Image: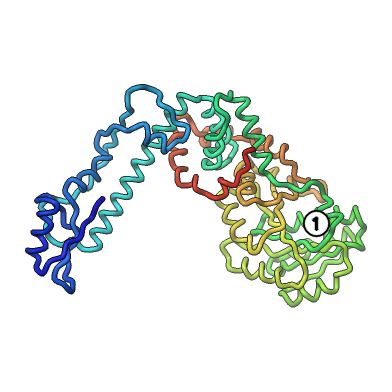
Amino acid sequence: MNVRKFTASTSRGAWSLVREALGPDAVILSNRAVADGVEILALAGEDMASLAEPFVEKTISETTLASLSPNYKPAQSEPLAISAPVPAVALPQSALGEINAAELHDVMKEIRSMRGMLEMQLAELAWTDQHKREPAKSSVLREMLAAGFSASLSRYLIERMPAGASKDSGMEWIKTILTRNLATIDNENEILEKGGVYALVGPTGVGKTTTTAKLAARCVMRHGPGKLALITTDGYRIGGYEQLRIYGKILGVMVHSVKDEADLRIALDELKGKHTVLIDTVGVSQRDQMVAEQIAMLTGAGSQVKRLLCLNATSTGETLNEVVRSYMGNGLAGCILTKLDEAATIGSALDVVIRQKLNLYYVANGQRVPEDLHVANQQYLVDRAFKLKRETAPFQFNDAEIPLVMANTARAMNDKSLREVILG
């Protein structure tokens, strides 16, 4: 769209300039007084008409389709055509009066909406064409979506899958790439032998206290109760301190309760002779400003406190992404995936761990202490993700729905986290 500006001492003079340059069908976008006289913003009639053309019967070039899907290849010698019966937006050619800023904003908003709808239709067409040409890729894509992986990560990997691969070989390639990008600790020595101060953080109900007790039991079995100390900051929840105190009594470990940064600093100073200190923190919603206060308290405690974020495997990918961004602060030591036994699918949780480059320490799959805590194993988790894929019809995508789902991923493909996925 080429909007031009014309200035003259009078409205008549400015309009004469518009007619000379753009012809009698020019569309006036604005007309206002300026220091030198009158200023008119105008658009040629053919330019305005062209804005409506995308929603009239139109031929789509191979170049356009290729730009929407890098794997697009011509499936026929005839150009493809689509028809989108969406009302075109055009200003009357007789509109010579002033159009204010609000009306211009509405016009541009409608144009952007029309453009977005066209892009989605073209993307749907491209993916439908790819499904016909490469059914193996479509089958692998359906498996990834059913396992809970995001459409953007699925598309990113599918587009880079080796050409000509069968469904089985394609699935093996996808699993290899996901396994390679899922960072885990090698063994429990990261915590049990090195020791240090670890704080388990996360939203309410994610299982921090139970996970703290499981870790505490493992430390006691390795080094004895004298080498471990437990601290709780959960003074808000009724019974929060009492629950950890019961676990501590069973293990023979004293539990210390702190209220603020000063208390925590004093407690850590008194416990600096301990091999391992585990801190059970109060659960805070990722949208609560208390998250920042909690991070500041742990960071300013005067000791090297490593934060482990507990992620609920039953949560959606969008929720987990929000949790990670909120709790990231100045950096997380890693994460623990909880409630694995309750999750219908775990692809979304693994997707977030991969995107956010988190180091996955443990997975928890039950309430038993300490049995239901396991060192994370990449290959097992990726295999489990596909074994737990959605089997219920309401949550499965059929062939007609997949192009629409993938059409919405065009902008998400610019996500930096996707470009950092290791392929080779």
Quadrant assignment, res 276: bottom right
Q: Is residue 58 above or below residue 248?
A: above
Look at 11% across and 63% down and name the residue there. 14
Q: Is residue 371 left or right of residue 413?
A: right
Image position, residue 28 (x, y; %): 16, 57
Image position, residue 222 (x, y; %): 90, 53
Crowding around mark 1 (Cα neighbors within 10 Å: few <14, some 14 to 19, many 20+) is: many
Image position, residue 7 (x, y; %): 16, 65
Look at 75% across and 50% down and name the residue there. 361
* Viewer-proximal residue among 18 and 31: 18
View extreme (top): residue: 77
* Viewer-proximal residue among 119 and 24: 24
Q: Is residue 167 left or right of residue 83?
A: right
Q: Residue tagged by mark 1?
A: 213
Q: Is residue 37 above or below residue 224?
A: below
User: How are the colours assigned in the image?
Assistant: rainbow
* Kind of residue at badge 1: Ala
Q: Is residue 303 above or below residue 58?
A: below
Look at 41% across and 32% down and name the residue there. 126
